[in-house]
């Protein structure tokens, strides 16, 4: 059985990547996935430190074929999702 997670193939892929990013974040920040929202601020809401940022970078690289995110451009969870989707879909 195959599920559809979006109206288009690209939207479905973005939604699947979004779920994977959420699982990586929940594991890295040691929080429940339900406590993460697209607007969660990595520093003020999730408590990102330089050590956690390094762990998150490694986890994203492991999960997404060595994809790197630019933490200078990232403030929220959605920012990470957008960067990962952009790198993976292009």
Image (cartoon, grey):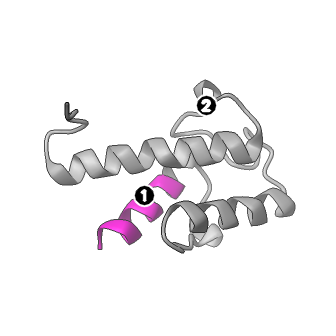
Q: Mark 1 = which residue?
A: 82
* Circle 1 crowding by C-alpha within 10 Å: few under 14, some 14–19, many from 20: some
The circle drawn on residue 55 is none
Check if mark 1's residue and mark 2's residue have beta carbons within 8 Å. Answer: no
Tell me if residue 84 is in the magenta stretch.
yes
Can you give x and y, in whole percent of width and height, for residue 18 in the image? 43, 46
Which quarter of the rendering shows the N terminus?
top left
| Image quadrant where residue 52 sits | bottom right
Tell me if residue 28 is in the magenta stretch.
no
Q: Is residue 38 left or right of residue 35?
A: left
Can you give x and y, in whole percent of width and height, for residue 61 in the image? 58, 68
Can you give x and y, in whole percent of width and height, for residue 8 in the image? 14, 46
Residue in the image at 84% along x and 63% along y: 50
Characterize the magenta stretch by its predominant secondary structure: helix
Q: Which residues lie in the magenta part?
A: 80-90
Q: Secondary structure at mark 1?
A: helix
Can you give x and y, in whole percent of width and height, for residue 32 in the image? 68, 28
Mark 1 or mark 2: name the one nearer the start of the chain: 2
Q: Nearer the viewer, residue 77 or 57?
A: 57
Residue in the image at 45% along x and 62% along y: 84
Q: Residue furthest front?
A: 1
Which quarter of the rendering shows the C terminus?
bottom left
Q: Secondary structure at mark 2?
A: helix
Instruction: Look at discs 1 and 2 and give the one toward the viewer.
Output: 2
The circle drawn on residue 33 is 2
* Circle 2 crowding by C-alpha within 10 Å: few under 14, some 14–19, many from 20: some
Residue in the image at 68% along x and 67% along y: 58
| Residue 28 position (above or below residue 39) | below
Residues under labels 1 and 2: Cα distance? 18 Å
Q: Nearer the viewer, residue 54 or 66?
A: 66
């Amino acid at each position: 059985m195959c599920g559809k997670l979006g109206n288009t193939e690209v939207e479905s892929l973005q939604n699947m990547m979004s779920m994977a990013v959420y699982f990586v974040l929940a594991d890295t920040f040691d929080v429940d996935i339900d406590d993460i929202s697209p607007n969660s601020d990595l520093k003020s809401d999730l408590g990102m430190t330089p050590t956690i940022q390094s762990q998150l970078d490694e986890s994203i690289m492991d999960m997404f074929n060595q994809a790197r995110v630019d933490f200078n451009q990232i403030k929220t969870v959605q920012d990470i999702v957008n960067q990962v989707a952009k790198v993976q879909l292009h």
